[in-house]
């Protein structure tokens, strides 16, 4: 059995930075420490941090209930109202929003204030999209499917500013922009898809096309891992989605010649290495 691991598998720059930020705060002895939402979509890392005293805030109400401590904003970012709330409560804010997401916040803030209608290509329920919406001075429109783009109608002659969730599929993004283009609105498009995602997706597609079986590692709630899985399964029917080495079914893989491995942006290197080692032994 041979194994090929994608070079782009695992933590991207923004996630690495956010996780490092939390460990730095732990080392500094800041107490109590909270992250606004799990720092990454990976139960193993979140549990390790919990053991070190880092608590996860699951809602705005939980944040409102705090009277002291440090609140860390994760790489997905949050809307302006959350920063305002942290400040109002007199809490210490440590902002680990990925700079690429921050750039989208600045763009939509500026363009919506200039009177443009913001269109976000992405998943309306994703926390990153929630955060982006929270920087628009007028309500943003979120489009995820071709049907939604076809049905979209501007009631007023206002120019559009189109941005994307950083982890959105590039090809789908282009398709939706093309649909909007047919409507001939005055529009500007800012491709805010992160290179880390594009590179990971392209490499996953390439490896999945070469191997007999493909393993995609990531948390069950991680949307970028789910997208990687879709891409790999299109290329290779024997694609398996696992969270840790314990989910690996070696019985199924044993008869396989070449195995490919990739992992979502929230998967620690340690887990990737464990899966690789297990496949080889
Ligand atoms: Fe930042 Fe890109 Fe990672 Fe998102 S995928 S956190 S934008 S580096």
Image: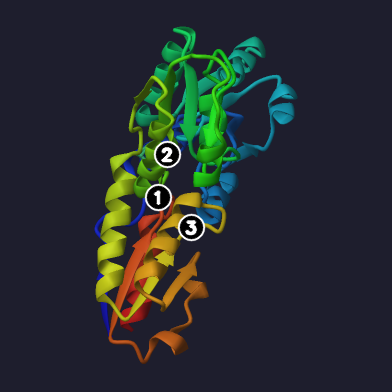
As measured in the structure, the alpha-carbon distance from the residue carrying label 1 to the one carrying label 2 is: 29 Å
Residue occupying the point 54% across, 41% down: 123
Label 1 element class: loop
Q: Which mark is residue 226?
A: 3
Ligand 1 quadrant in view: top left
User: Could you tell which of marks 1 and 2 lies nearer the N-terminus?
Assistant: 2
Residue 200 percent across, percent down from the top left: 31, 53
As measured in the structure, the alpha-carbon distance from the residue carrying label 1 to the one carrying label 3 is: 11 Å
Q: Is residue 72 left or right of residue 190?
A: right
Q: Does the residue labelled 3 lie within 8 Å of ligand 1?
A: no
Label 2 element class: helix
Mark 2 highlights which residue? Answer: 179
Density class for disc 1 (Cα within 10 Å; few <14, some 14-19, many ≥20) is: many
Mark 1 highlights which residue? Answer: 265
User: Could you tell which of marks 1 and 3 lies nearer the N-terminus?
Assistant: 3
Nearer to us of marks 1 and 3 is 3
Q: Would you place residue 265 above or below residue 274 in this image?
A: above
């Amino acid at each position: 059995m041979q194994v090929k691991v994608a070079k782009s598998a695992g933590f991207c720059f923004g996630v690495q930075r956010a996780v490092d930020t939390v460990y730095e705060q732990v080392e500094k002895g800041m107490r109590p420490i909270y992250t606004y939402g799990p720092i990454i979509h990976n139960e193993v890392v979140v549990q390790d941090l919990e053991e070190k005293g880092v608590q996860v805030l699951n809602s705005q109400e939980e944040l409102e209930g705090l009277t002291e401590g440090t609140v860390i904003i994760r790489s997905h970012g949050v809307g302006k109202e959350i920063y305002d709330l942290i400040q109002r409560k007199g809490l210490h804010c440590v902002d680990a929003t990925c700079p690429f997401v921050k750039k989208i916040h600045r763009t939509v803030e500026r363009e919506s204030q200039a009177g443009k209608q913001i269109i976000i290509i992405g998943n309306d329920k994703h926390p990153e999209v929630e955060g982006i919406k929270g920087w628009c001075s007028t309500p943003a429109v979120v489009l995820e499917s071709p049907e939604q783009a076809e049905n979209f109608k501007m009631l007023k002659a206002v120019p559009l500013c189109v941005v994307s969730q950083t982890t959105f599929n590039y090809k789908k993004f282009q398709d939706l922009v093309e649909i909007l283009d047919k409507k001939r609105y005055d529009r500007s498009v800012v491709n805010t898809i992160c290179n880390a995602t594009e590179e990971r997706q392209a490499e996953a597609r390439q490896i999945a096309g070469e191997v007999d079986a493909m393993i995609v590692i990531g948390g069950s709630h991680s949307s970028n891992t789910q997208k990687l899985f879709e891409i790999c399964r299109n290329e290779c029917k024997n694609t398996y989605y696992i969270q840790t080495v314990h989910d690996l079914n070696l019985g199924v893989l044993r008869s396989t010649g070449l195995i490919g491995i990739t992992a979502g942006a929230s998967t620690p290197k340690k887990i990737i290495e464990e899966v690789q080692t297990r496949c080889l032994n």
